[in-house]
Image: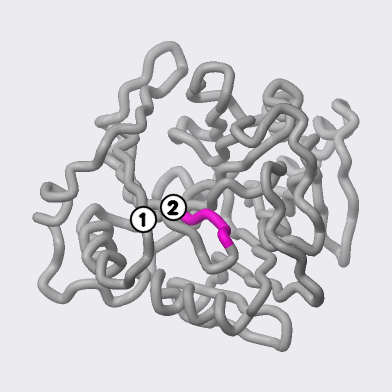
Amino acid sequence: MQFHRAPIAHVSHVDLKVTDLQRATAFYKQILGFQVLNQEASTAQLTADGETALLTLHALDQPSEKSRRTAGLYHFAILLPTRSDLADFIKHISAQNVPIGASDHLVSESIYFSDPDGNGIEVYADRDPSEWNWQNGQVDMAVDPIDAADILKHATDSGWQGLPAKTIMGHIHLHVADLQETKRFYTEGLGMEIVCRLGDQALFIADGHYHHHIGINIWNGVGAPPSADDSPGLKFYTIQLNSDEQKQSVLKQLEGIRADVTEENGETIATDPSGNRIRLVV
């Protein structure tokens, strides 16, 4: 978890648009084991530790069907503290009648599924950073089958008890319209680094030598339009910066590339070239 605290800039929170708040909240409680930190008529803040919100659900007033082949959320990723937690989660979700996928990324092991609105979710555990293979500033990643039998050897007697208190938001992966233009926003604007490339289709971006805090891809097509405002999906996500000085430096860099930055309700919102909105906080 050392890659998700100061001085490293990292994704700390995700805000999602959903069509049915009650249905979505029930899903995130039952399937992922979130607790409700605070709930109002149109929003629900969800937490793992009972203190810090990791995910906020926003009910759409008049939702349309989920946008297809657009820029926006591919998945957000919940990082579990240990491989044992992942083993317990696999046993739990396997009994929930939820379709899942799975991948061994060399740096991590992951389970994939979607919420009732089709928002993509990853639940994963990192391998120890000493096992990650770096070459010339790039980390080796793959999309291999997981060894489920080996993971399940680490399941605990108590089983899944909901998200462990040390669970955090690990990363976010986005569909974008143009890979190079979006790369410039995240590197020259936000000051992060490209740490892995998947051909000319996807880039993985990080601060502090993590395997990735942000993924971007063009799998929905070059020039994919932004997701509609009334469609389920990403509302915005939060990047936690280290200090006011770092925030001012980032804002100057964003101004230098003429990025879209606004102040909304006292919060700083930067919008990437594909319309994905990022809340910048200290």
Q: In this view, does 208 lie to the left or right of 179?
A: left
Q: At which x and y percent is residue 227?
A: 76, 50
Q: At which x and y percent is residue 186?
A: 69, 32
Placement of 27 over or under 171, stated as above or below:
below
- Kindly identify the residue that appears in the image at 67 percent across and 54 percent down: 237
Residue nearest the observer in this picture, 147 or 170: 147
On residue 227, the disc is none
Q: At which x and y percent is residue 28?
A: 48, 73
Q: Is residue 226 left or right of residue 4?
A: right
Q: Is residue 236 left or right of residue 30?
A: right
Placement of 8 over or under 57, stated as above or below:
above
Q: What residue is shown with label 2?
A: 122
Was residue 164 drawn as part of the magenta stretch in this picture?
A: no
Q: What residue is shown with label 1?
A: 100
Task: Please tell me in which quadrant of the rendered image residue 189 appears.
Answer: top right
Task: For marks 2 and 1, give the CA distance.
Answer: 10 Å
Q: Count of labels shown?
A: 2
Residue nearest the observer in this picture, 23 or 40: 23
- Kindly identify the residue that appears in the image at 80 percent across and 55 percent down: 228
Give the amino acid at mark 1: Ile
Give the amino acid at mark 2: Glu
- Kindly identify the residue that appears in the image at 65 percent across and 63 percent down: 16
